[in-house]
Image (spheres, rainbow, N blue to C red):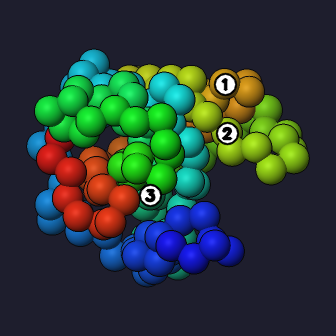
Amino acid sequence: MKDDQFYPDWLYKKLIENDLPWHKKASLSLESFCEKYTLHDSFWVGVFHHVAFDQSVTIAFQWDSVWLPDDIKEGTSYFDDWPFLFFQLEGVKEVTTANFENLDGINRAIDGAEFLELDGEQHLAIDDVYGGQVNIVFTGKYSILALNPDGSMLKI
């Protein structure tokens, strides 16, 4: 990684080109993911809405390995060693945000996430420790993918 960039080169390219290896996605449902793992203390990379070609959204996090089981990834407090976690949601109907204010360069850490189905729609709500909220309503499929900092697969 270069000194003037925060993330590895492969991440920039894969996110912009919507070219993550989704064929290697985890077999987890969002509900079982939320029961088994946590996003707590993970950092936002971003919400990428692919409006040019479809109604999908890719959500990217630097996933705090401290909260992961050691057989998946040994915990470390050094964030350059944290894996990247991605959710791809299809059939997105709505993306809303609330309470996002400038934190003068501080990366927003996640507090928690919740997934629920309501009236035929799926809702993913993510709250950060500073009061920011992202809510996504979608009706299509979803995929979950975890990659190591070098871009290799992380099996979850």
Disc 1, SS: loop
Circle 3: residue type: Thr
Earlier-in-chain disc, 1 versus 3: 3
Label 3 and label 2: CA atoms lie apart by 17 Å
Tell me if residue 72 can be seen.
yes
Could you tell me residue 54's position as x and y percent? 43, 70
- The answer to whether 72 appears left or right of 123 in the picture is left
- Which mark, by number, is residue 58? 3
Viewer-side residue, 94 vs 77: 77
| Badge number at residue 1 | none
Q: Do the residues labelled 1 and 3 touch (CB within 8 Å)?
A: no
Q: Which residue is drawn at 20% across and 58% down?
A: 153
Q: Tell me if residue 66 comes above or below residue 45 in the rendering.
A: above
In three-dimensional space, the C-alpha distance between marks 1 and 3, rounded to whole angstroms, equals 21 Å
Q: Which of marks 2 and 1 is nearer the N terminus?
A: 2
| Mark 1, residue position | 129
Look at the picture and state if 51 lies above or below 47.
Answer: below
Circle 1 or circle 3, nearest the eye:
1
Q: Name the residue under label 2.
A: 108
Kindly report the distance in space between the C-alpha atoms of the residues bearing marks 2 and 1. 7 Å
In the rendered image, residue 9, in percent from the top left (x then y), is placed at: 47, 77
Identify the residue shown where x is 32% and y is 66%.
150
Q: What residue type is labelled 1?
A: Val
Which of the 4 image quadrants contains residue 73?
Answer: top left
Query: Crowding near pointer 1: few (<14 within 10 Å), some, many (20+)?
Result: few
Within 10 angstroms of label 2, few (less than 14), some, or many (20 or more) residues? some
Which residue sits at x=12%, y=43%? 27
Q: Is mark 3 on a helix, strand or loop?
A: strand
**Which residue is at a point 48% across and 26% down the rendered structure image?**
40
| Tag 2 and tag 1, C-beta contact below 8 Å | yes
Percent from the top left, x then y, of residue 4? 68, 74
Amino acid type at image mark 2? Arg
